[in-house]
Image (tube, coloured by chain):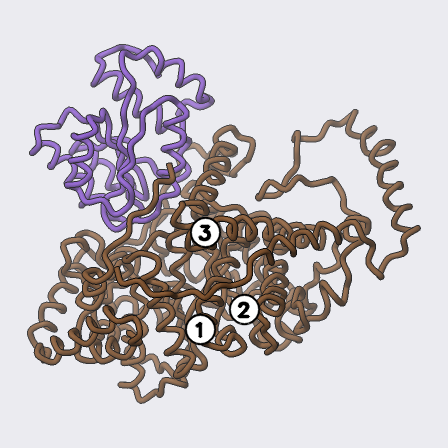
Chain colours: A brown, B purple
Amino acid sequence: MITTNLFKEFPKGYWKKKLEEKIQKRNTISRLYNKDEMEKIFEAEQTWRKEVYEQWVKERPERKQKFETDSGIELKPIYTPYDVKHIDYLEDINFPGCFPFTRGIYPSMYRGRLWTIREFSGFGTPEDTNKRLKFLLEHGETGLSVAFDMPTLYGYDADSPRALGEVGKMGVSVSSLKDMEILFDGIPLDQVTTSMTINAPAIVLLAFYIAVAEKQGVPLHKLSGTIQNDMLKEYIAQKEWIYPPEAHLRIIRDIMEFCTKNMPKWNYISISGYHIREAGASAIQELAFTLMDGFTYVELGISAGLDPNEFATRLSFFFNSTMDFFEEIAKFRAARRIWATVLKERYGVKNPRALLLRFHTQTSGASLTWQQPLNNIVRTAIEALAAVLGGTQSLHTNSYDEALCLPTEEAVVVAVRTQQIIAHETNVDAVIDPLAGSYYVEWLTDKLEEESYKYFDKIEELGGMVEAIKKGYPQKEIIENAYRQAMKVENKERIIVGVNEYIAKDEKIVNVFRTDPEVERKQRERLEKLKRSRDNKKVKEALEEVRRAFEDPSINLMYPILKAVKAYATLQEIMDIGREVYGTWKEPSIL
Amino acid sequence: MERGRNLQYFRDIINKLPKRIKILVAKPGLDAHDRGVHVLMRYFRDAGLEVVYSGILATVDEIVQTAIDEDVDVIALSSMNGAHLVHFPAVIEKLREKGASDIIVVGGGIIPEEDKPKLEAVGVTGNYGPGTPLEVILAHILSRVIKEKFKLDIKV
């Protein structure tokens, strides 16, 4: 392992101070409210609780012992101005497009432009996915989002023994520039934005994309899109890593440097809470771990000598939206507020554009059930509505059959239509952040913020996110939460319709999508042909340069990798050099 | 599908058995979807089983070697990737090759209905999908172990 000092020292104690500030502030009364009136409301609530509510429930008991959010925050039956008395409008909420952006990052939000409908898709050969991408564009999708298969995600070519049985199954198989050329054939890359869910080998896939664009005559600075490239959440939740954490962070740093210089419209890290949540995290954990990952990337960039006023404009986020409607909305609002506040205070960011937490949302795959799959349409619609009310910039709605398989075309169309119905029929686009001022939603937003600071402080105590990951801390927290949730479902403390209650007899399995079993053979053949027909001397030389850059962290890896992919070096040929130089990584035990 | 058996119910049965059941939970192939197995492992442990985990990205050879080295009674395979028809039968084949066919193999994950008979035919049973009650999975494993390993007649 070649070590390199990736991080500068940043002052400690900020999180603890913020947490203390928040706790102190809770006992104050903001300038919005009159102290006497607040005391009256407080007393009136006590009286109402005792004389009205408790009398009522004595006769008609509450259905549950305890009401709580999905994260386990205990809930009162009602919230009043007293619960939000410490929250100041101009300071903490303010107007859309104004610091701290609680109400939204743009002044006009959906009145100006609707969110981008972006359906994640990919399967089989590049030809198959090319067809699906065009199908989605024809049905009104406004941005592309590509899913790669497992071998690609782990940096293996389709002909690797490790790829056996997995080629084209969970996404599209891409092993070389050749595959990428087919994938985007007939799609003008200066006219679409493309999101690629790729992490460990992101640098190679980005190089493929750039090379395809060049062939189409599209210059680098015109390319608009996203690579996920968020390795911290891979170690925390999605677990698709190749090298140890420092090695991947070094590669991310190289991508940051390259893109800051050359690709002003490219989002080069999509800091992702989605997978953290899907792996079993609560809303609080999703919020806190994701933002802490984000701060870690900011520190990585600053340590590399980049200006956060510039590079932070290219960091975007990716959140989950699941079934606790109000907690999800509060989560999105809290995320914007925390991000802007911390970037401004801790990292001295002054450029207002660099303070904006732009985010994509995907509805929760884990909330879908294979039982009574049509119910998933309803779940997805509710989750999508929460994302819209939370001010998302783009949205993926899951298809109802995704608990069983990759989505069929019929199911994908329903998912797209769900977004179009929300956009055009519900009128929720008219008024920005309509839940602001709700005592409950403002209280919960504030509460999630406070709980996040607790986690930030704890992670700093452990030595920062990278160290916390090596100790298995976020991983264990998530799994413990997943187990608690599962036991609640097991014991019917939590009802999932069709799963542990309202169970259908004779459950019929719906139409299942299957990838073509021939994909593996086709991809292997294409690769074999490519390896025969390319200029192998040129490939060898290009790979030698890649090796030198892997070995010397002062060389930016992006340039030699670009050169190698243009010579048709394959994904695995490049990633394998890293395996030799950096080794692999084994997760700490989280049992 | 019988329902309503809690952890204590299973502990009472497990305590009656001649030996503590040891189970290897394994994720073959390039599959990192580990939420389900982590939940199951905690559940198995809380029920009184001894649990060994392969970690993600285990090869078939590694899984079988671990099962033999650790002398487990059961291997529980998980696949969320659609590669179950490749990896599950390969584990059975490898066990046979190594003379360890007495190890019970169960499976689970995203497994289409029509694939289940193919897995059953080679001896991989269960093959439950996401959302299956934990008790159903544990009851299935216990029934097989009690019958095939301990040759006992205890209803689960």
Mark 3 or mark 2, which has the lower sequence index?
3
The disc labelled 3 sits on which kind of residue?
Ile
Residue A65 showing in the rendered view: yes
Quadrant of the rendering where the C terminus of chain B is positioned: top left
Can you give x and y, in whole percent of width and height, for residue A243 in the image?
28, 58
Can you give x and y, in whole percent of width and height, for residue A336 in the image?
60, 64
Side (left or right) of A430 relative to A120: right
- Identify the secondary structure beneath mark 2: loop
- Which mark, residue A267? 1
Q: What residue is shown at x 14% (from left), y 54% (from top)?
A: A161
Q: Residue furthest right?
A: A36
Residue A138 showing in the rendered view: no
Chain letter, disc 1 residue: A
Side (left or right) of A281 relative to A515: right
Mark 2 or mark 1, which has the lower sequence index?
1
Residue tagged 3: A276
Q: What residue is shown at x 77% (from left), y 48% (from top)?
A: A83
Can you give x and y, in whole percent of width and height, for residue A477 in the image?
47, 42
